[in-house]
Amino acid sequence: MKQLRLALLGFGTVGQWLAEALQTQHAWLQQECGVVVTIISVATAHHGLIYQDDGLDIPTLLDLVATRRHLTTHPKVTHWTNVLEGLQSTGGDVLAEATGATLRQGEPGLSYIRTALTQGMHVVTSSKGPLALAGLDLLALARVHGVQLRMESTVMSGTPVLSTIREGMAGTRIRAIRGIFNGTVNFILSAMAMGYDYVEGLAQAHSQGYAEADPTDDVEGDDTVAKTLILATAAFGRALTPEQVVRSGITLLTREQMQQALDEGKRIKHVTSLRLLSKDGTEITRETADNGTIPTHLEARVEPIALPLSDPLARIDGLLNAIAIQTDTPQEVTVIGPGAGRFQAGQEMLADLIAIAKSR
Ligand SMILES: NC(=O)c1ccc[n+]([C@@H]2O[C@H](COP(=O)([O-])OP(=O)(O)OC[C@H]3O[C@@H](n4cnc5c(N)ncnc54)[C@H](OP(=O)(O)O)[C@@H]3O)[C@@H](O)[C@H]2O)c1
């Protein structure tokens, strides 16, 4: 039986879901995956890091959080106020990083991930910021230390996109990716396609709990730009900066523009596109690639586009996300599924964890 000692940094919505899943699926993980996962440390911003070498008791952890008691009241734990120092002192086989890392600085996740990789720990993370800002560097660091950095839940949380690209499509060369990567924005656009204006669509998203109190990161495209940067790294092996992504949000879209698109048999969607281009700015196709044209740069855009109904992305409604991947094989592959939620994010972290356990 393989033993996996887990450091869990971030014990909010996603971290708690993951801990609970490890508890309820304990027997299944042993029987089906041949792995016993023990949570040896847990950290939050307000509680610092607690550590127990024999493993923390998950029901106790969840009860402490539910009853708003301090994590240090868990029996027999060592405590660090400074989470980074705690991680450096206690290590583990895998870091599960689920802090609320910011999109702009990537912290605290970036420092935690760097530290863990440098210590020879595998990392699974649900935080977009660190991967968007330093994905290629972090993957290189993981390679140097012979460990894995997995990030399935950062793009289309709940739908296996990165593993589809990395494992399912291994051997193909990806030429372009298009996608709808923000459920809140897609929900608002779906409402607008039914005749509501932007303000009414946003109000509906708010009333159903699909939009943050401050929706800026979603509606102005920051969240989607972060996912675009992660895909640039994961699918194309290229590091782009946020400034290199041509971006426009959805706040200025009018009812008239939506109606005009409908009249033309189109639907306006907030589309991410990543395309390999040749030196003269033309798209790389099968033919030009066969003729030896070399891709020199990656174009990245996040913007509202009127798509014809024949395009699979035009028919993605409500909270759904989708990705359409063009490779050097003839047909585009489209994957449709959820893109957010505590279950979805936690489940993808669990899938990453199982992949690491199986490969050890
Ligand atoms: N929820 C989703 O549906 C979803 C989906 C995909 C990806 N994600 C990503 O997953 C990550 C976690 O999301 P969440 O919904 O679980 O967030 P959350 O409920 O706000 O929980 C964040 C956790 O991280 C802890 N934390 C914050 N700063 C920290 C620090 N400096 N050191 C240690 N711990 C720290 C918080 O501690 P305190 O409670 O003490 O502040 C809290 O326990 C985010 O990056 C989010 O974008 C979430």
Image (tube, rainbow, N blue to C red):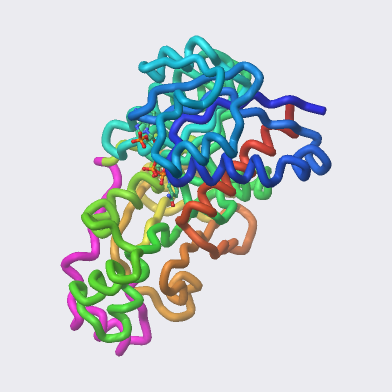
Reply above or below: 233 against 303. Answer: above
Residue 324 placement, left or right of 57 = left
Q: Using the image as rendered, state which of residue 111 and residue 221 is in the foreground.
A: 111
Q: Residue at x 35, y 52 (%)?
A: 224
Highlighted range, magenta: 243-269
Residue 294 appears in the figure: no
Reply above or below: 119 against 250. Answer: above
**In which quadrant of the rendered image does the N terminus lie?**
top right
**In which quadrant of the rendered image does the C terminus lie?**
top right
Q: Position of residue 71 (x, y in %)?
A: 45, 28
Q: Quadrant of ligand 1?
A: top left
* Residue positioned most to the bottom: 263
The magenta stretch spans residue 231: no
* Rendering quarter of residue 129: top left
Q: Position of residue 244 (x, y in %)?
A: 28, 42
Q: Using the image as rendered, state which of residue 198 and residue 229 is in the foreground.
A: 198
Q: Residue at x 59, y 61 (%)?
A: 333
Q: Position of residue 67 (x, y in %)?
A: 43, 42
Q: Residue at x 42, y 15 (%)?
A: 80
Residue 223 appears in the figure: yes
The magenta stretch spans residue 252: yes
Reply above or below: 235 against 111. Answer: below
Q: Position of residue 193 (x, y in %)?
A: 31, 81
* Rendering quarter of residue 198: bottom left
Q: Residue at x 58, y 19 (%)?
A: 52
